[in-house]
Image (cartoon, grey):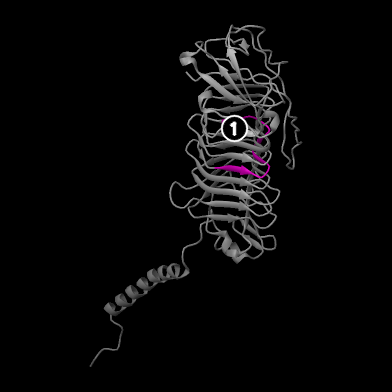
Amino acid sequence: MQSSHFKPRHLFSALLAFALALTLVPMFSVSAMGAAPDPNVLDLSSPPNNGLDGAVGRFSVNATAHVIFVSGTDPITITGDGTNSGDGWSVIVTDATQINLAAGTVIKGAVGEYALASDDAGEVTISGPSSGTPPTIYGVNAHGIVAGILKITGHIGTISSTIASNGIYATGDLLIDAGATVDEIAGAECAIFVGGAVTISGVVGPIDGDDFGIYSDGDIIIRAGADVGNVSGGQRGLLSGGNVVISGTVGSITGTGSAGISSPGDVTISGKVVGGITGAAPMIAASYAVLDYTGLTLTGSDPAVSHTVTFDYGTLTPGGDTLQTAYLAGATRIPAPTAPGYVAYAWYDNPDLTGTPWNFAADTVSGSTSTLYAGEIIPVTTPSSDGGGCNAAGFAPMLLALAAVTTIAIRKKP
């Protein structure tokens, strides 16, 4: 007869099966649930909370305004195509100082809202990817990027804005890193508008503003090794509240309605402006030092600055180089160049160097062309000029008069 009691080996088998079940249940549960979303990644193609009002982790959604607020100090990575939602999503980062943009990211700001903004008054870094499709940022009736002190690294595609707004708007400085590339910056008012200084060390494509290409309350510095495309503005190409230093390469600089470059300080060009500087007055500043004049063409679109003067150094410079330049400003006065190794020259209106030397502060020329010939060394004086400005909220505009400029220091690059 078979025994009816439970044998020990049966108990062991039952316990083993139960233990195995306890092991497998949580494993299958986690797999079914899926991995938790990364709290430091914002996917604009699938906005938090399905784009409905409310907070999810460090994200807070305003569905009516189509704005996503990002809190917390940890670096944030933004990915996805925000245009999939139709109206786009504006992103406001309140505390983080490092914003990483993944390849293929498209940030389209909601109508009337900044596309990408930082509330931090200190320095914030926006980094593009090192490979893949560069991200795009554009504001619709509002600025593209807004920050305090803004640093750009990596590769970013187009930064732009429409209707009375700026592509980049920084209340402090703008720094484009030596390893950075920005394909294009455009603005319906200014392409770049900053309350501090602009320093470009990397590669930037065309910079085009309906009013101003670059407006800076401080210095505008294009460092050696930087490569910048054409800079243009409906009024001024470069407008600086400080000094302008171009040590790198720029395609061309154009200010259609006013000046190519205007500054109350000094303009120093030791690099190249390949396509020249063009404006009603090509340059307006307190003084100029163009250290490689052989690669620079100045063109004035206003009849008052459209005459051409040739400065003939004769044997006083190697090779007897000549310089052709347009009038910088004023109806009939012309700029006076200098050359390396010389304090200055006296200039005469005849090749025999007879008569009274040319007085750049008082003498005028007539006709469309003229030639001045270099003679003895004399002192050089430089003129003064006032400031200039761009219309943008938060900054008092500076108004630049087209004052006559009588002196330009032009030195041949060693």
Q: Looking at the picture, does residue 351 appear above or below residue 400?
A: above
Question: Could you say where residue 256 lies in the image, as x and y percent from the top left?
Answer: 66, 39
Q: Quadrant of the N terminus?
A: bottom left
Disc 1 marks a residue whose amino acid type is Ile
Q: Residue furthest bottom?
A: 1
Q: Is residue 74 left or right of residue 279?
A: left
Q: Taking 233 as reference, is 6 left or right?
A: left
Which residue position holds label 1? 277
What are the residue bounds of the magenta stretch? Answer: 206-221
In the image, residue 29 sits, relative to residue 367, either above or below, namely below
Q: Residue at x 34, y 74 (%)?
A: 15
Q: Give x and y (percent) for residue 209.
A: 64, 43
At x 52%, y 51%, the residue is 135
Helix, strand or loop at label 1? It is strand
* Residue 178 image point, x, y percent: 49, 35
Q: How many marks?
A: 1
The image quarter containing residue 200 is top right
Q: Residue 229: horizontal and vertical position, in percent?
A: 53, 39
In the image, farthest residue toward the left: 1
The front one of 3 and 88 is 88
Most frequent secondary structure within the magenta stretch:
strand
Q: Does the segment drawn in magenta span residue 65?
A: no
Instruction: Count residues near mark 1 (Cα–Cα under 10 Å), then give few for <14, some for 14-19, many for 20+.
Output: many
Name the residue nearer the viewer: 357 or 183.
Answer: 357
**Residue 219 falls inside the magenta stretch:** yes
Is residue 95 visible in this depiction of the protein?
no
